[in-house]
Image (cartoon, helix red, strand yellow):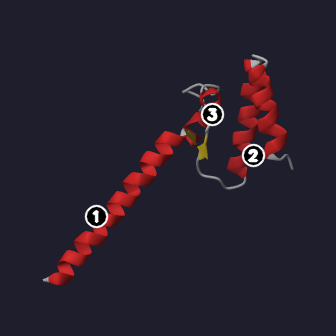
Amino acid sequence: MATMEHIVIPAIEALKRKDMEGARNLMRIAVNVLLVRAVNIVVLASDEMQGLLSLDDPLSKKCINPMDALVRSTLRWAKSIQNLHTQTSYLEY
């Protein structure tokens, strides 16, 4: 089975060579491999990688940038703290 090193590093190298089609194809393979391995969301940490997949590409729906991931995680944490506070308030009465 292909490892991420065998796919992502060549994708980055293709991107540096300005081979957008090659980089896009390798990125699509990498995202597919991760999805097959039961990953739900792929965090694309590189700004350049985020622009490889078009917005209408179905695989782009499975990708997220790090800032979005941080915001989603923070919102989940804040909601859990709010729920905990609400439950604790009921116990005080």
Q: CA distance from mark 1 to mark 2?
A: 37 Å
Secondary structure category for the residue under label 1: helix
Which residue in the structure is indicated by mark 3? 46
Q: In the rendered view, would you say 82 is above or below 53?
A: below
Q: Nearer the viewer, residue 58 or 80?
A: 80
**In the displayed structure image, the side of residue 53 where residue 2 appears, left or right:** right
Q: Amino acid at mark 2?
A: Val
N-terminal label among 1 and 2: 2
Using a 10 Å C-alpha cutoff, classify the residue at mark 3 as few (fewer than 14 neighbours), some (14 to 19) or many (20 or more): few
Secondary structure category for the residue under label 3: loop
Which residue lies at the image location 77% right of the left edge and 30% below the top edge?
A: 11
- The answer to which image quadrant residue 5 occupies is top right
**In the displayed structure image, the side of residue 85 where residue 42 appears, left or right:** right
Q: In the rendered view, would you say 22 is above or below 37?
A: above
Using a 10 Å C-alpha cutoff, classify the residue at mark 2 as few (fewer than 14 neighbours), some (14 to 19) or many (20 or more): some
Which residue in the structure is indicated by mark 1? 82
N-terminal label among 3 and 2: 2
- The answer to which image quadrant residue 49 occupies is top right
Q: Amino acid at mark 3?
A: Ser
Which residue lies at the image location 79% right of the left edge and 24% below the top edge?
A: 14
Residue 45 percent coordinates (x, y): 61, 38
